[in-house]
């Protein structure tokens, strides 16, 4: 009897795991346009922002473990890849294209990593039914989340996923190609997904349900004060940012158009600005293009190594004392 009871409990647990979507499969929260690095862009402190912008976050970590000689050797090979027309010069456009490529690489690597989990019939496409079954389990069918505590929460999550899937699915057959599935998982990277990104952003931040985002909702999305805690300076700065740059028509809230401008600024291209920065700092003869020598002469701005990290660590330790 006890053995039967154990088997029954294990069976229920297994079903529960299948029913409840895991966090990594349902966490599609959309934020405003991402920066090229989590680090502050302050060259007087270090070049970590530039390293992650130029190499990508994960590759920058690899370079941090190299000797200066190895780092420069690998940088030379990268320069050859950046020079698309093989004329021996790196233009601002080529540099910008490279930075965009490195920043988007994680998107496609993420899709490739999880593709087999969703493509159950191995037809190199992912249907909405395959995604729904893999993400939400059998409870997404006729069962309707009967064994899930917060049924309504999961119903809303699935409907939100379905809406985004249909938006990504250009031909409307509810079967996603690799490109369409990439747009579904990373809609912030695709122009034709902008409308659904705005919609999801409003759903996430708009707590009073009026279809817009006021300054209180804007701040609450990024900061929750502790009891009797004075408001930090950065929060005061964000309040001013909302007033000066987010609320364009000065009505005290952001509508769909203003939110779209916030998360997809048309006049701010991170990759292009970083390319211009690297070009300006490395172009010694001021001909608006870089040779491999000019880049290698300024290699520590483009890439890291054990030597540059050691120097930064010494600086930090000195500042701490």
Image (cartoon, grey):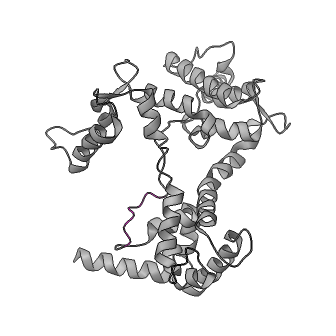
Q: Is residue 292 above or below residue 194?
A: below
Task: State the residue at coordinates (60%, 34%).
Answer: 193
Residue 141 x/y as whole percent:
69, 16
Task: State the residue at coordinates (23%, 39%).
Answer: 225
Q: Which residue is farthest front?
A: 287
User: In the rendered image, which quarter is residue 74 located in?
Assistant: bottom right
User: In the rendered image, which quarter is residue 100 located in?
Assistant: bottom right
Quadrant (top left, top right, bottom left, bottom right) of the C terminus? bottom left
Q: Give the range drawn in magenta.
A: 37-43
Task: State the residue at coordinates (29%, 26%).
Answer: 251
Residue 181 x/y as whole percent:
70, 37
Q: Is residue 156 above or below residue 48?
A: above
Quadrant (top left, top right, bottom left, bottom right) of the N terminus? top right
Q: Nearer the viewer, residue 285 or 31?
A: 285
Q: Is residue 37 above or below residue 166?
A: below
Q: Is residue 84 above or below residue 89?
A: above
Numbered-mark total: 0
Q: Majority secondary structure of the magenta segment?
A: loop
Would residue 163 be visible to someone looking at this image?
Answer: yes
Q: Nearer the viewer, residue 125 or 289?
A: 289
Q: Is residue 160 left or right of residue 143?
A: left
Q: Is residue 219 left or right of residue 193?
A: left
Task: State the residue at coordinates (44%, 72%).
Answer: 47
User: In the rendered image, which quarter is residue 83 located in?
Assistant: bottom right
| 192 in magenta | no
Would residue 12 be visible to someone looking at this image?
Answer: no
Q: Nearer the viewer, residue 107 or 172?
A: 172
Residue 41 x/y as whole percent:
39, 64
Q: Is residue 6 left or right of residue 27?
A: right
Residue 284 x/y as whole percent:
50, 83
């Amino acid at each position: 009897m006890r053995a039967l009871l154990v088997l029954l409990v294990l069976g229920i647990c297994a079903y529960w795991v299948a029913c409840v979507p895991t966090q990594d499969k349902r966490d599609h929260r959309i934020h405003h346009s991402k920066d090229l690095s989590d680090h502050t862009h302050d060259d007087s402190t270090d070049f970590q922002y530039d390293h992650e912008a130029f190499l990508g976050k994960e590759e920058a970590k690899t370079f941090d473990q190299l000797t200066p000689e190895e780092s420069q050797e690998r940088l030379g090979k990268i320069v050859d890849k950046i020079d698309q027309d093989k004329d021996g010069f790196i233009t601002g456009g080529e540099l910008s294209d490279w930075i965009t490529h490195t920043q988007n690489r994680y998107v496609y690597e993420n899709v490739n990593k999880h593709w087999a989990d969703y493509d159950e019939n191995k037809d190199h496409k992912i249907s909405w039914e395959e995604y729904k079954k893999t993400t939400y389990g059998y409870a997404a069918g006729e069962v309707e989340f009967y064994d899930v505590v917060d049924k309504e929460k999961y119903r809303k999550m699935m409907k939100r996923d379905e809406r985004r899937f249909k938006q990504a699915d250009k031909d409307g057959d509810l079967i996603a190609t690799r490109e369409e599935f990439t747009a579904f998982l990373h809609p912030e990277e695709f122009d034709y997904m902008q409308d659904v990104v705005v919609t999801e952003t409003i759903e996430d931040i708009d707590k009073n349900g009026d279809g817009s985002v006021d300054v209180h909702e804007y701040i609450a999305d990024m900061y929750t004060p502790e009891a009797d805690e004075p408001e930090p300076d950065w929060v005061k700065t964000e309040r001013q940012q909302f007033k000066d740059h987010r609320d364009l028509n000065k009505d005290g809230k952001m509508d769909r158009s203003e939110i779209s401008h916030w998360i997809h600024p048309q006049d701010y291209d991170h990759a292009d600005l970083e390319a211009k920065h690297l070009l300006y700092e490395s172009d010694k003869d001021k001909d608006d293009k870089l040779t491999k020598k000019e880049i290698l002469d300024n290699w520590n701005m483009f890439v890291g190594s054990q030597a540059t990290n050691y120097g930064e660590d010494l600086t930090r330790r000195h500042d701490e004392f």
